Amino acid sequence: MAHPTGKYADVEGLRERAVALRRAGYSLRQIRDELKIFNNDILNQLVKGEPPPEWTKRPRAKDDLRAKARELRIQGWTYDQIEAELGCSRSSVSLWVRDLPRPERRRSRDEAAAIARKGWEAKLRVRDEERQRTKTGAAARIGALSDRELFLLGVGLYWAEGSKDKPYERREVVTFVNSDPGMIEVFLAWLDLLGVERDRLRFTVMIHENADVPAAERYWADLVGADRTAFNKTTLKKHNPKTVRKNTGDSYRGCLVIKVLRGADLYRRIEGSWYGIVVSVREADQRNRT
């Protein structure tokens, strides 16, 4: 230490006092205030070699986490579980516990898979219940349909799923195709509303050749309440061995085609009604914009 002058001239005396205060548990700040030594370099030289008191040491913030991580690892927890429990990074967990033995697998892979599958099935049940509640509530809010509501619904239904006239091919025929029994029922009710006699209807079942064709034919005949004489020959779709069919099982009944005989005038009314709906929507939208 350089030769001091002035109030720091008695270096040995200051050092003895500083060391005594340090050993008595004083912090550097307390020693500075006590000895009136405000030069940090001199202060540090006076207490050099003397360890700071324990109470001045800053605790390591992660010491408790490390201890807890080691405790959990010993109990058999995985890295993922410890990470989720303590909210720390995986790298920290690895650093803290990598010297500990790997916990023994408590369950076989099949047991673990069964537990995971059971949890997933429970989650699916909850989702299905929520889905069904939503559907049931929506159905209840519909209530009875007026004739006008059914008429507009039928026009939109046909324009989405029915055959349409083309500029390059004049086809003013009414043909509706769908696999949804509910759609078929609504379409038939709509035809009844328009006064279309049932004897003007012809039906055709379209189905994959590998399906239960006779059962599908019976199903559609019962649904529409028509005699078999109103059904044309069933159209069979050839099986492609390169494809895997998903439309299988008892619920697969193919599609039903409904054709209205002498339907040119009806088709023109449908098309005109659809354009009327479009114009009405455009006008309503324009009013909302102004």
Image (cartoon, grey):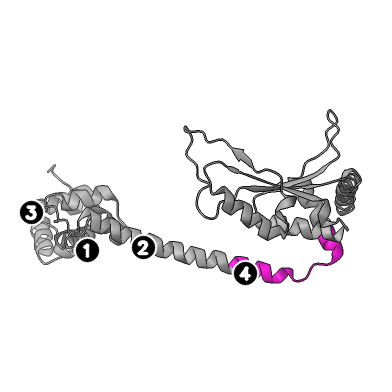
Report, in whole angstroms, how far the alpha carbon at label 2 lies from the one at label 3. Answer: 76 Å
Q: Which mark is residue 136?
A: 4
Residue 130 in the image, given as x and y percentages of width and height: 53, 67
Report, in whole angstroms, how far the alpha carbon at label 3 lies from the one at label 4. Answer: 93 Å
Q: Earlier in the sequence, mark 4 or mark 2?
A: 2
Report, in whole angstroms, how far the alpha carbon at label 4 lies from the one at label 1. Answer: 76 Å
The three-letter code of the residue at mark 3 reads Glu
Query: CB under 8 Å between callouts 2 and 3?
Result: no
The three-letter code of the residue at mark 1 reads Gln
Write down the quadrant of residue 185 in the picture. bottom right
Query: CB under 8 Å between callouts 1 and 3?
Result: no
Report, in whole angstroms, how far the alpha carbon at label 1 lies from the one at label 2. Answer: 62 Å
Q: Who is closer to the viewer here, 82 or 130?
A: 130
Q: Secondary structure at mark 1?
A: helix
Query: CB under 8 Å between callouts 4 and 1?
Result: no
Report, in whole angstroms, how far the alpha carbon at label 4 lies from the one at label 2. Answer: 26 Å
Q: Who is closer to the viewer here, 77 or 98?
A: 77
Q: Please report the residue visible at 78 percent of the width from the left and 44 percent of the height from the top.
A: 175
Residue extending farthest top: 168
Q: Earlier in the sequence, mark 4 or mark 1?
A: 1
Few, some or many C-alpha atoms within 10 Å of disc 3 (few <14, some 14-19, many ≥20)? few
Few, some or many C-alpha atoms within 10 Å of disc 4 (few <14, some 14-19, many ≥20)? few
Q: Which mark is residue 12?
A: 3
The three-letter code of the residue at mark 2 reads Gly
Q: Which mark is residue 119?
A: 2
Viewer-nearest of discs 3 and 4: 4
Q: Secondary structure at mark 2?
A: helix
Q: Secondary structure at mark 3?
A: helix
Q: Please report the residue visible at 55 percent of the width from the left and 41 percent of the height from the top.
A: 209
Viewer-nearest of discs 4 and 2: 4
Say which residue label 1 marks.
30
